[in-house]
Amino acid sequence: MNTISLARLKKGQEFSIVSVDLPLEIARRMYDMGLCKGVGGRMERKAFLHGPIEISIGNCRYALRWNEADGVLVTAVHAGSIP
Amino acid sequence: MKDIAPGGFSRVIRVAMAGNPNTGKTSLFNAITGMRQKVANYAGVSIAKAEANVHHQSRVLSIIDLPGIYSLSAHAADEAITWNYILDERPDVLVCVIDSCNLGRGLGLCLQLFELGRPVVVALNMVDEAAKAGIDIDTNGLSLCLGVPVIATVGTKGAGKERLLAAIIEAASQDVMLRKCQYSKDIEEAIALIHSAVDAWAVDDLARPHRWLSLQLLEGNHSEWQRMKMLGGSAPILEIAKKTRLKIEALHSKNIELALAQERYNYIAQALPLFEKASATADHLEKRKKLTADDILLHPVFGLPIFLLLMWAVFKVTFLVGALPAQIIREGIGWLSATAAPLIPIDLVRSLIIDCILGGVGTVISFLPLIVMLTVCLSILEDSGYMSRAAFLTDRWLSIFGLHGRTFFPLILGFGCSVPAIMATRSLQNKSDRIIVCCILPLLSCGAKLPVYVILAAAFFPHNADTMVFVIYLTGAVIAFLASLVMKSLLFKDKPSFFAMELPPYRMPSAKVVVSQAAQSALTFVRRVSTIILVVSIAIWAATNFPRPAVTDGSRNGSSTVTAESMAAQHKDILEHSFAGRFGHFIEPVIAPLGFDWKIGVAAFSGMAAKELTVSTLAILNGSGSNSNTGELAAHLKENSGLSGAAAFALMLFTLLLPPCIAALSTIRSELGNRWLAFTVTYLCIVAWVISWAGYSIGKLIGI
């Protein structure tokens, strides 16, 4: 399956994290917050013009900047967008 | 291993509460100890440790609440507090508080705590919310799997606290079974290699569990590495650790820190389905399709306007609801002065009681309802979970000014009081962010500045007092952002900051929490007024009355027939001759361009002790002595202070921008040190003068 950056997902798409390509300090923080390889989640919301994005993982919601989300590579699991 | 034997036989059991941020550690701590530490629904509320004793089963437990941590690597100052405590103070029992809705991540931290070789008790907090979300956790199964007691708790209701305490006492008296996360074979071998080197070296004052230390050295934990260097004779071990790390990183083609975090995650992910049953029912999925609160509040277009509207509403509600009780208090004080004045025979004593205590301190106390209302509004927002959304919404706009969403929390706290706000910057990961936020916080209007604006606005701009106050608030915020931009681009040209944050679920604000916080703020305010403000007010009153001119002494002892004019002239004479008068005249050349006479200067500078003092000093300086028969300072000011509208506007700006009170300054000093304190004071003095001068000039120009 092709990998794309988390930031490119559409609202409602589900994903599984493949790798976190960010500077070490930030990557470490992401891992500690529970965003590491193999974790599945869902794109919940995107703001306009590369604004922050919101994802959910399990019962937890996270806000990320577009830049950071762009460094997270994922595979899109489910393309069905829920309006 | 001797160094990790439990110290549970001492009489007092020291219990540290550790866990991810926003898992309810402080709620649980409050439930157990009956304390009233601040709680709210966002990550990073607790920024210092709190400690309280509890008696249970004839044992004394010292419970220590610590700031939340995501993992062992301390990124921010608040996380460092937690790790320093756990490592250096070596508590007898560690309570790992886990949010039941987020079990996996909590267990990740739990595994890291295991490595410390201390007795661990797991508190599975917020089980009620997990049940609502359809998550069923097999507590016994989890306990068996982990080999430590697992207690289901609900911190906000105090459920499970007895069982938790019992488990803690039992754990303290038992030997610790060494439990650890089993890493992959090559990593375990690498740990073993360093482990044996550490064992062979084993100095007495190592005070770290050997396996844990080996793991840290393998990861390259900076602070442990530095600590080892200090101990001496550790060079060969560090060499081994470095070589091993490079070998492993080459093998995994990945940074070792990330590799270890990944393995911990995998370890948990395998085990999790055994005892966690998440029933994502059709009902649950159905819910997803419905419009949630976030669809509106975080709407790409309407989100930000809604946020601004909410902030404006907070402001408006504070004034609307706070106005009536404030009025009642003011009138009560007015009545009291009017009644008491004729009963006091000695001029000096009358002036002290009427002008200073009732007129000055009394006017300040009448702002109690406003302060309480502001706290109520802010704490409802904080407890609802909206604050994190606001941080999300404002991130992009804040980033224009070199700030980011995470800095929103201390900034909003700054509208209440700068002291907790400055301390809240500990949760910021970047040192430069922290410095910037600390330095700009004094520019925001704290609750203590509010009385000054309100009095001046009511006196000089009676028709649009609210708008004027709002303009001042806004000016403060704008200047703060500009200051941040300047600091970021001149002093800290480093990498852009990082923003990733949890959005906690919305919760109904708890009445208990809101009332407790309102009571706390009322108490703090009353304490301030009855101590520093009272004492400094009396000191200022004394400084305005002494030393007395020789003539006045004579007239006081002599004739009793004095006209109103001669009284006023005499009052003026006393003022001019007093210490305050001399100081005022000394600084007058500096403040004259701002439209202030020396009295206003004295009032503005007295605000350095506590901002509200500007109000009480104005009252003392402009009090018409024994003729005062009203508590309404506002009307009185307009008649007697000789201020023009433009100068009053400038005084509001001056109060806003002048360096903050001593309490805030000493907090800046303790958080950042003397250099940054000096920097803050200097730049604030300059900004205050320039902006107030500009405000005065513009005010004169448009003729307010």
Image: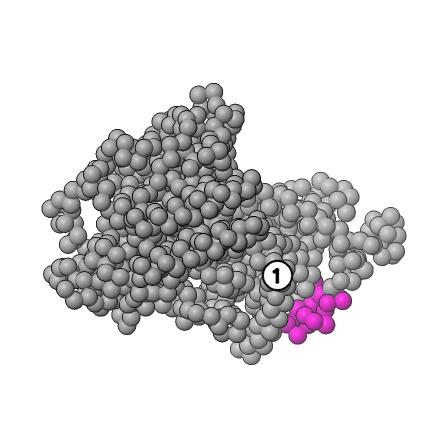
Q: Quadrant of residue A31?
A: bottom left
Question: What is the count of numbered marks?
Answer: 1
x and y, in percent, of residue B283 in the image: 13, 45
Q: Main secondary structure of the magenta part?
A: helix
Left or right of B1: which side holds B642?
A: right
The answer to whether residue B594 is magenta is yes
User: Which residue appears at 55% of the width and 42% of the height?
Assistant: B203
Classed neighbour count for the residue bearing mark 1: other residues with Cα under 10 Å, few (<14), some (14–19), many (≥20): some
Magenta-tinted stretch: B585-599
x and y, in percent, of residue B382 in the image: 39, 50
Secondary element at tag 1: helix
Placement of B37 over or under B253, stated as above or below: above
x and y, in percent, of residue B627 in the image: 70, 51
Front-most of B384 and B279? B279
x and y, in percent, of residue A55 in the image: 25, 58
The answer to whether residue B235 is magenta is no
Colour setup of the view:
one colour
Question: Mark 1 sits on what residue?
Answer: B677
Asked if one can make out residue B167 in the rendered structure from this viewpoint, the answer is yes
Q: Quadrant of the C terminus of chain B?
A: bottom right
Asked if one can make out residue B520 in the rendered structure from this viewpoint, the answer is no
Placement of B556 over or under B50, stated as above or below: below
Front-most of B32 and B447? B32
Q: Amino acid at mark 1?
A: Leu
Chain assignment, label 1:
B
User: Which residue appears at 19% of the width and 55% of the height?
Assistant: B291
Left or right of B606: which side holds B74?
A: left
User: Which residue appears at 25% of the width and 40% of the height?
Assistant: B130
User: Which residue appears at 88% of the width and 52% of the height?
Assistant: B554
Left or right of B273: which side holds B657?
A: right
Residue farthest along the bottom direction in this orientation: B701
